[in-house]
Amino acid sequence: LLEFRERKVELAILETGLGGRLDATTAARAETVAITPIALDHQQYLGDTLSSIAAEKAAIIRPGVTAIISKQPPEALEVILRQCTASGVDPKVNDCRYRIDEVTEDGIMVATFETTQDRYRRVRVGLRGRHQLDNIAVAIRLAETLQDRGFKISSAAIVEGIQNARHSGRLEFWAGPPHLLFDGAHNVAGAL
């Protein structure tokens, strides 16, 4: 973070490791934060319920931030919304809708995403797994929030990012023979 400040980095996208309150990325004092679907994860540090984990992760929400919140289990969403209220933040909750238009034989989805700002039609999703649609919805809203702040991110660039995203070893298809699907995850939710 010191290097970013010294080089006057205009935009840095940081992913938290453990989550909100305990994560080193909180030192960045982000203007925009996002919370992807919460699941049981890092319980030895964050707690053993969705509510306790949500409370830790929601700690990144503080006065003045823009908060993008993905679809959540009800008990996690309740905690996140409580943190938003306490911080005076009006969150953008699951406000990118999507539908699957097609699924190829090798598991690639073609989907349409829609926000209040734009519609991204029949986008070929580069990452496999239905869960990626929720992640993409968050990424789209983050990009649109950056557009609102003056960053030049075209709709075409958003679509290109969705189509070209790759994550080796996560639902990676090998045509074989035999056909194989490689996957790895560190928790149950990540393996679904």
Image (cartoon, rainbow, N blue to C red):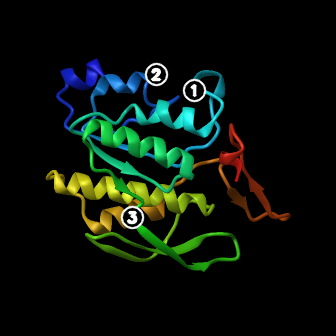
How many numbered circles does the render carry?
A: 3
Of the two numbered discs 2 and 1 on the same chain, state the one appearing first in sequence: 2
Q: Amino acid at mark 2?
A: Leu
Q: Secondary structure at mark 3?
A: helix
What is the distance, in whole Å, between disc 2 and disc 1 at their CAs?
9 Å
Q: Amino acid at mark 3?
A: Glu
Q: What x and y, as percent, mark residue 35?
A: 44, 44
Marker disc for residue 160: 3
Judged left or right of residue 47, residue 11 is: left
- Residue 173: quadrant of the picture: bottom right
Quickly name the residue at label 2: 22
Asked whether disc 2 touches disc 1, contact meaning CB atoms under 8 Å apart, the reply is yes
Of the two numbered discs 2 and 3 on the same chain, state the one appearing first in sequence: 2
Q: What x and y, as percent, mark residue 103?
A: 63, 77
Q: What x and y, as percent, mark residue 148?
A: 18, 56
* Label 1 Cα neighbours within 10 Å, binned few <14 / some 14-19 / many ≥20: many
* Label 2 Cα neighbours within 10 Å, binned few <14 / some 14-19 / many ≥20: some
**Residue situated in front as seen by the camera: 106 or 100:** 100
Q: Secondary structure at mark 1?
A: helix
Asked whether disc 1 touches disc 3, contact meaning CB atoms under 8 Å apart, the reply is no
**Residue situated in front as seen by the camera: 14 or 38:** 38
**Residue 12 visible:** no
What is the distance, in whole Å, between disc 2 and disc 3 at their CAs?
34 Å
Quickly name the residue at label 1: 46
Marker disc for residue 96: none
